[in-house]
Amino acid sequence: MSSPGSIVIVTDQHLSANPRVWKEADALARNGYEVEIITRANNAMRKKKDMAILQKLHPSVRYSPVVNAIKAEIPALRDIYYRSRLKLVLLAKRLGFESRYLLSTDPDKIYTESLSRNADLYIAHVECGLFVGKHLIQKGKKVAFDFEDWYSRDYLSPVRAVKLLSSLELHALQHGVYVTCPSVAMADALKQTYNVADKPEALYNGFADSPVQEVANLRDDSMVNMVWFSQRVGPGRGLEKIAAVLKEVNTKVKLTLIGDCPPEYEATLNDVFPKEHKLELVPPVSHTELDNMLQQFDIGLALEEIYPESRNKTITNKILQYLQAGIKVLATNTDGQVEVAGCFPSSVRTVRTNDTTGWAAELDALIAEPVEREKIKEVYHKHFSWAAQEVKLLSLVEKALKN
């Protein structure tokens, strides 16, 4: 049977840091499309992880890191060139000039390699993809865009090329054959901000269910079991807030933090954590292990910030993974998380990000709420699972190729 079309997915990130890319590639390849991922490699450890991920994808997916920026793997002169150019563009940024080299090490190479494939459809991801996608469109190519984030509204990095990104976002929204993003909240904001005719389609950051795997028992049946996870445990993530709030909660709680925690911050947490409750820190685990671990808990904490605006509008993996595991969630009231909470009126409680006054009462109410694990999972799978997103993705791609 002939392929329904060739698709090049454009990014500059490693697969291990870019799950939307590998989920998309696998789904399209399983449905008969010829799929190639064109990207950059800049970290040897992540490159190894990429190889492990590729082993689990459809075997026809091609992976092409056409830009190699791993110092140990490239000639010294090329490394010096990349580093010197970056210093120059950072200096130019301080003087008010923004360069495409603030977006990626070598976006020109990613563009020329992508163009040479002459694909039926290109799907552009991340900041580099915005630049490459624009130039592919100017060559008459069909390009779709996945706004994994609202790039121009992520102000945490002082060297972010905000003006350049804004112009690229506008071009993508005006000329992409379709545009996707991680939430309806972000889709609405993009449409309103840029005053474009078509609203992006929300493709949530859901995952397929992981296989059942035996994991460490982290549950304490004498307490309410709460969990929070991230690659790194550290300040500014709401953990100090929840420690203070727990002083007002009468029910005994065990809070498990899964992630890499520096010793000095662990000491800080132990100092502020109320002694009547229990705190346990667990090192990072694989995605499959995490999915199985989360099912041991009663409540997950999704303590996201409303600033910058990109963070307010997105929906992170965290809240979705809790719901996939069938556990209740205490979530801060970012626009993205409020969107999710609307589908789980009794299982997700939202609290104000910048005011912890009502947190204890909401947590008490959530603790008292009966756990309906199967109902939570059912709603998750209907609206937020990767299977549900895949249906939308395949429909968008089919329409794009027909038009």
Image (cartoon, rainbow, N blue to C red):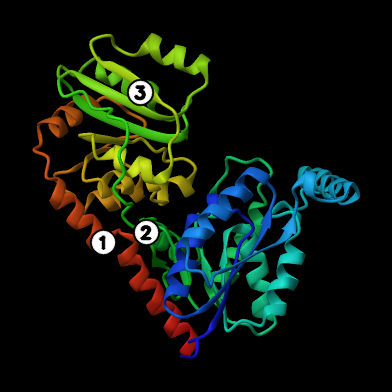
Q: CA distance from mark 3 to mark 1?
A: 31 Å
Residue in front for this viewpoint, 305 or 290? 290
Which residue, given by chain and number where applicable, does mark 1 sit on? 383
> Percent from the top left, x then y, of residue 334?
35, 44
Q: Does residue 327 appear anywhere in the picture?
A: yes
Which mark is first along the chain, 1 or 3?
3
In the figure, is residue 273 to the left or right of 325?
Answer: right
> Percent from the top left, x then y, of residue 351?
27, 35
Q: Residues within 10 Å of mark 3 (few under 14, many from 20)?
A: some
Which residue, given by chain and number where applicable, does mark 3 sit on? 241
Q: In the displayed structure, would residue 284 be above or below residue 122?
A: above
Residue 204 circle label: 2
> Percent from the top left, x then y, of residue 50?
57, 53
Q: Are marks 2 and 1 in contact (CB under 8 Å)?
A: yes
Observer-side mark, 3 or 1, equals 1
In the figure, is residue 228 to the left or right of 156?
Answer: left
Which SS class for mark 3? helix
Observer-side mark, 3 or 2, equals 2
Q: Residue at x 48, y 72 (%)?
A: 196
Q: Residue at x 70, y 82 (%)?
A: 139
